[in-house]
Amino acid sequence: MSDKTDRASGAIKETAGKATGDPDLAAKGRREQMKGDVKKSGKKLKDAAKKM
């Protein structure tokens, strides 16, 4: 999945977990959001390296 997809699906899972009182689902959503953030950071780093 792309970084945007990971962040979006993570946000949905986190919200669903909070709404249903499922802390495991909320935590899984937060992890997916962080995964998307890491992918985005990696892309930015790669782009910066190309400019050098």
Image (cartoon, rainbow, N blue to C red):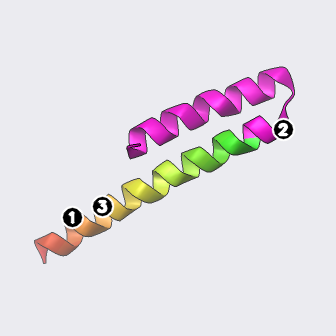
Whether pointer 3 and pointer 1 mark residues with C-beta atoms closer than 8 Å, the reply is yes
Q: The magenta stretch spans which residues?
A: 1-26
Whether pointer 2 and pointer 3 mark residues with C-beta atoms closer than 8 Å, the reply is no
Q: CA distance from mark 1 to mark 2?
A: 36 Å
Crowding around mark 3 (Cα neighbors within 10 Å: few <14, some 14 to 19, many 20+) is few
* Amino acid under disc 3: Lys
- The residue located at (58%, 37%) in the rendering is 10
Horizontal and vertical percent for residue 52?
13, 78
Residue situated furthest top in the rendering: 19
Residue situated furthest front in the rendering: 1
Crowding around mark 1 (Cα neighbors within 10 Å: few <14, some 14 to 19, many 20+) is few
Horizontal and vertical percent for residue 11?
59, 33
Q: Which mark is residue 47?
A: 1
* Majority secondary structure in the magenta region: helix
* Amino acid under disc 1: Asp
Give the answer, above or below, for where 18 lies relative to 50. Answer: above
